[in-house]
Image (cartoon, grey):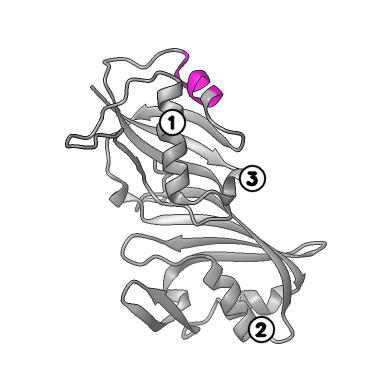
């Protein structure tokens, strides 16, 4: 048995799939490609598959990770081709490698945020350079007021033809922030902001040493 990890991307219409839909797509695609993955035990066995960091619906990503166990001692030379042929448009496997570390070792996640509309990029940059930028954040235990800058390790904001592009590095694990809160914070604190459309793309996941997390 091999403990493996996929690196894949989600783009286009596939971003509208929920986390549960994505899991179901992979289950069916592994079966369609006749890849011998390990199954759970019990009355209702199903393929053991686990996504490292579930992606919010309507987000694109070029750095998704899916863990699985292969009932074989080698990976077929056509593994990626066979699986991609079975997957729907918008989900593409880029590589597969032996899994060593658990996803708990992921500590940072980077995103690109494209905002269309009226947005003062200089004011945005100045806003996130200070502390005490408070906003209400929802969690499983309810809502609480947090300092959004506690979750930000790095942020840049550049003006674009239609608005602004933000590149942000956020903490994850025990201190996780959905990047949608970045836009909510801007709308709350930056005067005359009028954002008409926002798109989000996850660009990389990192370990504590700021190295891309893979194996």
| Closer mark to the observer between disc 1 and disc 3 | 1
Q: Can residue 95 be seen in this view?
A: yes
Name the residue: 46% across, 62% down: 170
Label 1 sits on residue = 28
Magenta stretch bounds: 78-85
Q: What is the distance, in whole Å, between disc 1 and disc 2 at their CAs?
A: 46 Å
Taking the magenta stretch, the answer to whether it contains residue 79 is yes
Main SS category, magenta section: helix
Estimate the x, y position of residue 149 in percent, counting from the top left: 47, 75
Mark 1 vs 2, N-terminal side: 1
Q: Quadrant of residue 33?
A: top left
Report x, y in % for residue 183.
60, 72
Which structural element holds mark 2?
Answer: loop
Task: Tell whether position 131 is magenta.
Answer: no
Q: Which of 132 and 97 is in front in this view?
A: 97
Residue 37 versus residue 136 in the image, above or below: above
Residue 215 seen in this snapshot: no
Q: Earlier in the sequence, mark 3 or mark 2?
A: 3
Mark 3 vs mark 2, CA separation in Å: 32 Å
Label 1 to label 3: alpha-carbon separation: 18 Å
- Rendered image: mark on residue 13: 3
Residue located at (70% from left, 87% from top): 191
Picture layout, residue 32 above or below residue 89: above
Q: Is 120 on the left-hand or right-hand side of 40?
A: right
Judge whether 191 appears above or below 94 on screen: below
Q: Mark 3 falls on what kind of element?
A: helix
Looking at the image, which residue is at 58% across and 51% down? 16
Q: Crowdedness of circle 1 by 10 Å Cα count: few (<14), some, many (20+)?
A: some
Secondary element at image label 1:
helix
Q: Residue at x 27, y 35 (%)?
A: 100
């Amino acid at each position: 048995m091999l403990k493996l990890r996929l690196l894949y991307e989600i783009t286009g219409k596939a971003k509208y799939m929920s986390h549960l839909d994505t899991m179901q797509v992979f289950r069916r695609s592994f079966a369609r490609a006749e890849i011998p993955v390990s199954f759970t035990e019990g009355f209702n066995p199903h393929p053991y598959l686990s996504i490292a960091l579930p992606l919010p619906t309507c987000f694109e990503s070029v750095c998704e990770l899916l863990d699985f166990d292969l009932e074989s001692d080698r990976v077929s030379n056509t593994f990626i081709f066979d699986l991609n042929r079975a997957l729907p448009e918008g989900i593409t496997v880029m590589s597969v490698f032996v899994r060593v570390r658990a996803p708990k070792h992921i500590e940072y996640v980077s995103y690109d945020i494209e905002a269309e509309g009226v947005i003062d990029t200089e004011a945005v940059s100045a806003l996130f350079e200070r502390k005490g930028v408070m906003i209400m954040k929802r969690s499983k235990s309810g809502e609480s007021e947090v300092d959004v800058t506690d979750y930000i390790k790095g942020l840049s904001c550049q003006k674009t033809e239609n608005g602004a592009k933000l590149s942000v590095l956020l903490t994850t694990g025990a201190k996780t922030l959905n990047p949608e809160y970045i836009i909510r914070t801007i709308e709350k604190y930056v005067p005359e902001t009028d954002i008409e459309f926002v798109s989000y793309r996850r660009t990389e996941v990192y370990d504590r040493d700021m190295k891309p997390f893979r194996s």
